[in-house]
Amino acid sequence: MLDIRKLEDLAEHIRNLLPGGAAELRDEIKSNIRATLSAALARMELVTREEFDAQSALLARTRERLEKLEAVVAELERRASS
């Protein structure tokens, strides 16, 4: 679902923006940031790029098939009205 490495990198980047005086506090904040970001992203119901691409391909095939069926129906209607 989500790329854990990117989430780790983002949490680490935010942690590095904090003052360097209290390393323990920075590590705790990093853990809290990671958990908060993970929960927020999970609530967004995001899909992976692979899932998106698969659904896009399925939609394209379905659209193509629908267009062919519409052409067949139009031809049958034309023949029936003649």
Image: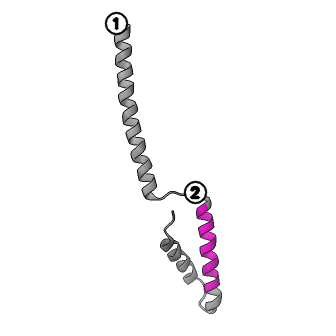
Seen at 53% across and 79% down, the residue is 13
Measured from the top left, where is residue 43 in percent x and y? Answer: 62, 60
- Res 77 quadrant in image: top left
Q: Which residues are magenta?
A: 27-42
Measured from the top left, where is residue 60 in percent x and y? Answer: 39, 41
Measured from the top left, where is residue 36 in percent x and y? Answer: 64, 71
Q: Identify the amino acid type marked 1.
A: Ser
Question: Any magenta on residue 12?
Answer: no
Q: How many marks?
A: 2
Height in image: 25 above or below 65? below
Seen at 39% across and 21% down, the residue is 73
Q: Earlier in the sequence, mark 2 or mark 1?
A: 2
Q: Residues within 10 Å of mark 1 (few under 14, many from 20)?
A: few
Left or right: where 50 falls relative to 44:
left
CA–CA distance in space, label 2 to label 1: 52 Å
Q: Residues within 10 Å of mark 2 (few under 14, many from 20)?
A: few
How are the colours assigned in the image?
one colour
Residue assigned mark 1: 82
Question: Any magenta on residue 28?
Answer: yes
Left or right: where 47 falls relative to 73:
right
Residue assigned mark 2: 45
Left or right: where 49 falls relative to 43:
left
